[in-house]
Amino acid sequence: MTQKLAETQYPVHDFIRSRWSPRAFSDRAVEPEKLLSLLEAARWAPSSYNHQPWSFIVATKDDATEYNRLLSTLVEFNQGWAKNAPVLILTVAKIRTDDGKTNRHAFHDLGLALENLILQATSLDLFAHQIGGFNPETAREIYQIPEGYEPATVVTVGYPGDPQNLPDGLRDRELAPRTRKPLTEFVFTEKWGHTSRLLKG
């Protein structure tokens, strides 16, 4: 297992420090009860007006036909590594409320549900990698997703594998340290771009 603990400026929960997005996955199957725990965690995410505008289409390698259908929505580059993950999840946001209004918080709320799912995965020694490189229209056609719903991402879930099995370029990225912008670049006070006094102490 490749451990990539975040080098944080301030203390955070260990699940946040240890969460990262690998591309190397083991062929070990994810236990159904663990997968259900991930989905249950997503279920309890907060959402605007409690609309809960998320849906998930799940495929596992136990059903090769369904797994390959979902895998086929990914761009070729992502298929090359994602095919090793035992679980694929297509995430969908409901972008209109039941009365037909645009829900501008739909993707935000889906993101909250996914963070719940991902942190629950981390607590179970599983890892997840969200993928934006897929064809939403192909996904819409394959799964007959209705108007008012938007395919958002595909998530791989599984146990970590050996980075040495990745191609050279991906292997280097897999083993590189995790980095983030410092708080001074995005935490402001008084006006845009003015670093918060919290960070000047």
Image (tube, rainbow, N blue to C red):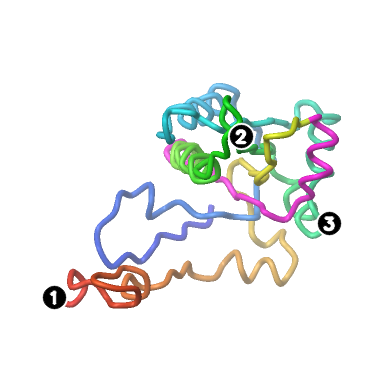
Decide if residue 117 is on the left or right side of residue 197. right
Closer-to-camera residue (49/114): 49
Give the quadrant of residue 71.
Answer: top right
Mark 3, residues whose alpha carbon is within 10 Å: few (<14), some, or many (≥20)?
few
Task: Tell which of 59 and 62 is nearer to you.
Answer: 59
Tell me which segment is drawn in magenta.
122-144
Secondary structure under the numbered disc 2 in the rendered image: strand
Q: Are marks 3 and 2 in contact (CB under 8 Å)?
A: no
Measured Cα–Cα span from mark 1 to mark 2: 43 Å
What residue is shown with label 2? 94
**Callout 1 touching callout 2 (CB < 8 Å):** no
Magenta stretch contains residue 97: no
Q: Which of the marked residues, 1 or 2, is nearer the chain's N terminus?
A: 2
Disc sitting over residue 76 in the figure: 3
Q: Is residue 141 above or below residue 83?
A: above
What separation in Å lies between label 3 and label 2 (alpha carbons)? 27 Å
The label on residue 86 is none
Task: Give amino acid for label 2.
Answer: Lys
Neighbor class of circle 1 (other Cα within 10 Å; few <14, some 14-19, many 20+) is: few
Residue sitting nearer the eye, 182 or 97: 97
**Tag 3: amino acid:** Glu
| Amino acid type of the residue tagged 1 in the rendering | Gly
The residue under label 1 is 201
Residue furthest left in the image: 201
Question: Compared with residue 92, is residue 185 higher up or lower down, i.e. above or below?
Answer: below
The percent position of residue 125, horizontal first and vertical second, equals: 48, 40
Q: Residue at x 72, y 31 (%)?
A: 60
